Amino acid sequence: MAHAYEGRPIDVVLRAMDIVIASAVLVLLGPLVLLVALATLITTGTPVLYRGDRVGRAGRVFTMYKFRTLAADAESRLGPYLGKELTRRTEAELTGIGRALRPTHLDEVPQLLNVVRGDMSIVGPRPVRPPFFEELCERIPGYWQRLVVRPGVTGFAQTRITREDSWADKFVHDMEYIADRSVRLYLRVLAATLWRVLHRITRGEGKPSSP
C-alpha cells in the first residue's frame, strides 16, 4: 500500500508555500506569541504548550503543539468523547485565558512550528489522535486515504461544516480537498478560514476546538 502515499508535483509547490507563509507569520506574530506564552504561564502555570500525539502523513505519529487552553490533564478526562459531548465537556475545562484565545485561534499558532518542521501543512485534513484514527478506520471505509497528505492547521471541511457534523461528512470534504488540491484551492481555504476567524472575533463568538 506504500504507493498510495506517493505525492503529486503540486505537493512540492504547496510545501514551499507552507514554509514561506508559516515562517512569515511566526516572525510577524513573534511578539504577540511571547505575550500569550507569558500570560498563560502567569495565569495557569506550566505547561504553557499542549503537546499531543497525532497521526500524520503515511501514518507517522508526531507531536502537535498548541498553547494550553484547558485545565491540567484535561485530555485524560476528555479522551473518550467525540462530537457534541466533547464540545460540552471541553467548555467546562477551558481556562480563563483559553476562553480568550480560542475565538481568535491564537492557541493554534504553535502549530506553525509543526508546519515548518514538515509534520503538518497549513491546509489539509485536521490531524486525529491515534486511538480515534484506528476507530475511524474501522467505522469509515477508506479513512486511511487521509494520510496521503500532511494534516493541516486548517482544512476544507472546517470551512464548510461544524465540529458537530459526523466524521463521515468531514471525511467527504477532506477527500474532496485531497483529490482537487491545488494552489487555488489552498488559497481559497486559507482565505475562508481567515474570514471565519475575523467574523467570530467581530461578533464575539467562538466554540471550543479539540484539545
Image (cartoon, rainbow, N blue to C red):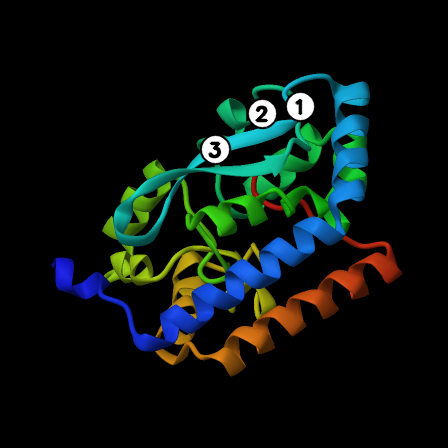
Q: Secondary structure at mark 3?
A: strand
Tell me: residue 44, above or below residue 7: above
- For the question of whether residue 154 can be seen, the reply is no
Indicate the position of residue 197 as horizontal and vertical percent values: 74, 61
14 in relation to 206, above or below: below
**Disc 3 versus disc 2: distance between alpha carbons?**
12 Å
Apparent side of residue 106 relative to residue 174 in the rendered image (left or right): right
Determine which residue is flagged by label 2. 74
Q: In this figure, which residue is indicated by the disc labeled 3?
A: 52
Q: Residues within 10 Å of mark 1 (few under 14, many from 20)?
A: some
Q: Residue at x 39, y 39 (%)?
A: 62
Q: Nearer the viewer, residue 12 or 62?
A: 12
Q: How much space separates mark 1 and mark 2, taking CA atoms?
A: 5 Å
Residue 71 disc label: 1
Q: Residue furthest top?
A: 45
Q: Residues within 10 Å of mark 3 (few under 14, many from 20)?
A: some
Residues at circles 3 and 1 in contact by the CB criterion of under 8 Å: no
Q: Earlier in the sequence, mark 3 or mark 2?
A: 3
182 and 196: which is toward the camera? 182
Please tell me which residue is depicted at 74% across the width and 31% down the height of the picture: 37
- Image point (58%, 75%), residue name: 187
Which one is in front in this view, the residue at disc 3 or the one at disc 1?
A: 3
Q: On the picture, is 181 further left or further right than 23?
A: left
Query: x, y (%) of residue 177?
Result: 43, 73
SS for callout 2: helix
Please name the residue shown 48% across and 37% down the image: 81
Q: Are marks 1 and 2 in contact (CB under 8 Å)?
A: yes
In this view, the mark in front (3 or 2): 3
Left or right: where 191 falls relative to 75: right
Q: Position of residue 165 (x, y in %)?
A: 52, 60
> Mark 2: few, some, or many residues within 10 Å (few <14, many ≥20)?
some
Q: CA distance from mark 3 to mark 1?
A: 15 Å
